Image (cartoon, rainbow, N blue to C red):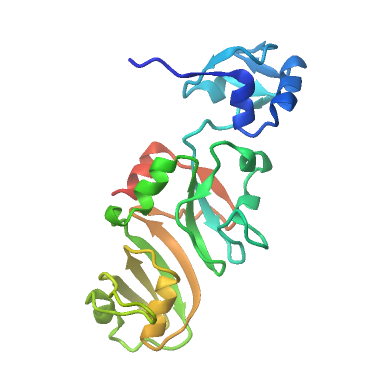
Amino acid sequence: MSKAPTLRLDRLLSNLGYGSRREVQDLIEAGYVLLDGDAIIDGDEKIAVTPDLPTRMTVEDEPLDPLPGLVLMLNKPVGVTCSHKEQGPLVYSLLPERWCERNPALSTIGRLDKETSGLLLLTDDGALLHRIISPKANIPKRYDVTLDRALRGDEAKIFAAGTLMLEGEDKPLLPAAFEAVSDRRGFVTITEGRYHQVRRMFAAVGNHVTALMRDRVGALALPDDLAPGEFRILSEDELAKVFS
């Protein structure tokens, strides 16, 4: 069995966004940090960073925030942007304020444009992020599409052919699946992540997307009980569904 890594208490709390080293030290010296019910008053103390630490440590009477390796599922609303730097409402503003100060930082796994809603994953695990977004992963992503005009009827055949060219590009799209559910709505499943891909696919067949919502990544589906703007931590079993 491998030994759990250890970290100085002040560094651990600072990395989790509780404040600067000085601010964290003040919390510790005031007796606000407890481990197994006992106050730790020395910020230099080495803490074993075990998976059960958030159930054993409290900060100001609240359980310790999740440890690094955090993976979130967020139901992104329309009107917020997947960015750390752009203007306007950002997806990170939907998270607890302290979580935006974590190191390593939380980042979105891929992006949904401002007018696209639905299933968005975030993590502070860089290796996992790259594993999911890598073109080699070939992870399918399904979108619920609402259209301005009635379907022609040949969209599924065109998308599946693997020959569709997007405007301004010189490489055809990989085959994509399309299932119509009405004359102006359907589900499209893609394995690539080109810029505004789904919107441009329908533009290429003479239509316009009026609403777009991602409801599935791999076999992981957006839960019905996760309202727009809400998030939850993924379990290991749920994360495994991304690669199913």
Work out whether residue 186 or residue 3 is closer to the camera in this orientation and state it: 3
Number of marks in the image?
Answer: 0
Up/down of 113 relative to 182, above or below: above
Work out whether residue 227 or residue 53 is closer to the camera in this orientation and state it: 53
Residue 42 shows up from this direction:
yes
Residue at 53 percent across and 21 percent down: it is 53
Residue at 50 percent across and 61 percent down: it is 118
At which x and y percent is residue 190?
33, 66
Residue 183 shows up from this direction:
no
Residue at 67 percent across and 31 percent down: it is 18
At which x and y percent is residue 213?
48, 66
Residue at 36 percent across and 39 percent down: it is 237
Looking at the image, residue 9 sits to the left or right of residue 139; the answer is: right
Which of the 4 image quarters holds residue 150?
A: bottom left
Which of the 4 image quarters holds residue 138?
A: bottom left
The quadrant of the rendering that contains the N terminus is top left
Up/down of 36 relative to 80, above or below: above
At which x and y percent is residue 61?
70, 24
Looking at the image, residue 26 sits to the left or right of residue 96; the answer is: right
Q: Residue lying furthest left in this view?
A: 161
Up/down of 139 relative to 211, above or below: above
Work out whether residue 123 or residue 77 is closer to the camera in this orientation and state it: 123
Looking at the image, residue 84 sits to the left or right of residue 73; the answer is: right
Looking at the image, residue 59 sits to the left or right of residue 123; the answer is: right
